[in-house]
Image (cartoon, helix red, strand yellow):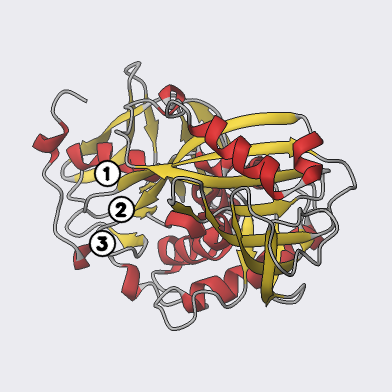
Amino acid sequence: MRVVICGGGAIGSAIAYFLSRRGAEAVVIERNEVGGAASGKSGGFLALDWCRGTVVDRLARRSFALHAELADTLGNPWGYRRLTTYAGWAIESERASGGSRQAWLSDSVTITGQIGTPETTALVEPRAFTRGLMRAAEAHGAKLRQGEAVDLARSSGSIDGVALEDGAVVEGDAVVIAMGPWSILASRWLPLPGVYGFKGHSLVFETGDSVPAEALFLEYQEASGEVLTPEVFARADGTVWACAVSSTSPLPVDPAGVVADEGAHARLEALCRSLSPVLAAAPIRARQACFRPVTEDGVPLMGRVSGVDGAYIATGHSVWGMLNAPASGEAMAELILDGVTSHVNLTPFAPERLKVFDPARLGGA
């Protein structure tokens, strides 16, 4: 079976990997670069049980286990590491009464508790993870095709593959839409619910070995009184990733056109410098902005596209895309090849639960 996957992010790469391991021929179409959007710029934080009580819980637990297995099986080229995770708070320009118990944090930070252990929280470097899975898929026969998908190729009502902007057709027996928030563009070809982009900004600091294997989830009150919720993660490659500033800026048509909001990185840098003397002294390796995909009900879209044989969708994972990529790839591969899934029930993620998006709303995009 030949499956064409539109999108070279973590979800698309994971689907390609699990399909190729089963002997199917997977072709990933990517218009820019593998892991070039949120899958290369996100935090890469993984949690075993933080989705408990939701329909995503089983997916997350299966995926957390698969992350450990994949790192072991494929040699961990993406810096998978276990973490201790803490919660706390800070107020700009104010010293906390108790101060931080972490040597790398400033006295303005109060740690209120441990919310994750090395058994329940972990981290990957997301770009390396996404590209590593794609390379592993290629080792099993998958192919990567540069190009922009613009339509489905059909004959006699059945799907023959995907049409590219340059006029070429990538033939396939099935097609998976896995383009993150840009999956909404495929609503011109398929009856799909809306997928939207929520913008985030992040910084990557070069800290060497001065920060231990820890993650922080904080509440931070700026001098203006506004409260932000920074997340700070220490990676295995000697960097620290931090975020706190989000917005609902318009999604550009091309992922390569994503730019930071004015002042967002300066605001985030000032916050980080105040949280930690280590970050205050560290050079910045990257200033990033990306859009994560969200749905109307906050639940991913995964499954068959109603009324179109051979069409599937897998997107809308929001902040848990990196966590849930492995189990999503495994389940989608099972659904496509077997018609059923063995580890995760995809019924709660079926696209028909939401109303179909009207592509006329896209205008000339």
Q: Pick whichever, 97 or 183, lies toward us.
A: 97
- The image shows residue 356 at horizontal and vertical percentages of 14, 54
Label 3 belongs to which residue?
351
Give the alpha-carbon distance from disc 1 to disc 2, as whole Å: 6 Å
Q: Residue at x 68, y 44 (%)?
A: 274
Task: Judge left or right: residue 68 versus residue 332.
Answer: right
Give the alpha-carbon distance from disc 3 to disc 1, as whole Å: 19 Å
Q: Residue at x 57, y 46 (%)?
A: 243
Task: Judge left or right: residue 130 versus residue 190.
Answer: right
Label 1 belongs to which residue?
159
Mark 3 or 2: in front is 3
In this rendering, the count of numbered labels is 3
Q: Is residue 199 visible?
A: no
**Amino acid at dot 3:** Pro
**Amino acid at dot 1:** Ile
Q: Earlier in the sequence, mark 3 or mark 1?
A: 1
Q: Pick whichever, 220 or 24, lies toward us.
A: 220
Quadrant location of residue 100? Answer: bottom right
Secondary structure of the residue carrying tag 1 is strand
- Quadrant where the C terminus sits is top left
Mark 3 vs 1: CB contact within 8 A: no
Q: Residue at x 27, y 64 (%)?
A: 297
- The image shows residue 329 at horizontal and vertical percentages of 52, 59
Mark 2 surroundings within 10 Å by alpha-carbon count, few (fewer than 14), some (14 through 19), many (20 or more): some
Circle number at residue 310: 2
Mark 1 vs 2: CB contact within 8 A: yes
Q: Is residue 104 above or below residue 335?
A: above
